[in-house]
């Protein structure tokens, strides 16, 4: 339980974690306009997004926006 409290304190202090999302397909400028907070790279038929997020809820918000754009999810990770 102490680890949860440490995470909450880090988040409250403004610490952001790095979320990484990979979707199938090569998204162009539309994705950059829809997700300006993300760094976007296209590699071998996939689009890789990196964003600094406060918590998992913010990461899930990004995932919902990608779903709304019709993106097919390949992988998701969040750095500790």
Image (cartoon, rainbow, N blue to C red):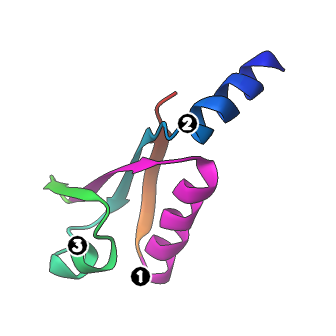
Label 2: how many residues lie within 10 Å, few (<14), some (14-19) or many (20+)? few
| Residue topped by disc 3 | 32
| Residue topped by disc 2 | 13
Q: Which residues are magenta?
A: 46-70
The local secondary structure at tag 2 comes to loop
Location of residue 31 with respect to 21 vertically, above or below: below
Of 53 and 15, nearer the camera is 15
Which of the marked residues, 2 or 1, is nearer the chain's N terminus? 2
Quarter of the picture holding the N terminus: top right
Residue occupying the far top of the picture:
2
- Residue 71: image x %, image y %? 40, 72
Which of the marked residues, 2 or 3, is nearer the chain's N terminus? 2
Where residue 3 sits, quadrant-wise, is: top right
Where residue 26 sits, quadrant-wise, is: bottom left
The answer to whether residue 73 is magenta is: no
| Residue topped by disc 1 | 69
Location of residue 59 with respect to 32 vertically, above or below: above
Which of the marked residues, 1 or 3, is nearer the chain's N terminus? 3
Where residue 45 sits, quadrant-wise, is: bottom left
Please give the name of the residue rendered at 48% of the width and 75% of the height, measured from the top-left corner. 65
The local secondary structure at tag 1 comes to loop
Q: How far apart are the alpha carbons under marks 2 and 3?
A: 28 Å
Please give the name of the residue rendered at 40% of the width and 51% of the height, measured from the top-left corner. 21
Residue occupying the far front of the picture:
13
Label 3: how many residues lie within 10 Å, few (<14), some (14-19) or many (20+)? some
- Residue 39: image x %, image y %? 23, 55
- Residue 43: image x %, image y %? 15, 52
Between circles 1 and 3, the one closer to the viewer is 3
Location of residue 11 with respect to 38 vertically, above or below: above
Label 1: how many residues lie within 10 Å, few (<14), some (14-19) or many (20+)? few
């Amino acid at each position: 339980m102490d680890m949860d409290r440490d995470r909450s304190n880090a988040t409250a202090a403004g610490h952001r974690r790095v979320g990484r999302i990979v979707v199938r397909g090569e998204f162009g400028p539309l994705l950059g306009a829809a997700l300006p907070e993300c760094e976007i790279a296209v590699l071998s038929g996939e689009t890789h997004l990196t964003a600094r997020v406060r918590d998992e809820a913010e990461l899930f918000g990004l995932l919902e926006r990608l779903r709304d754009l019709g993106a097919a999810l390949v992988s998701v990770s969040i750095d500790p």
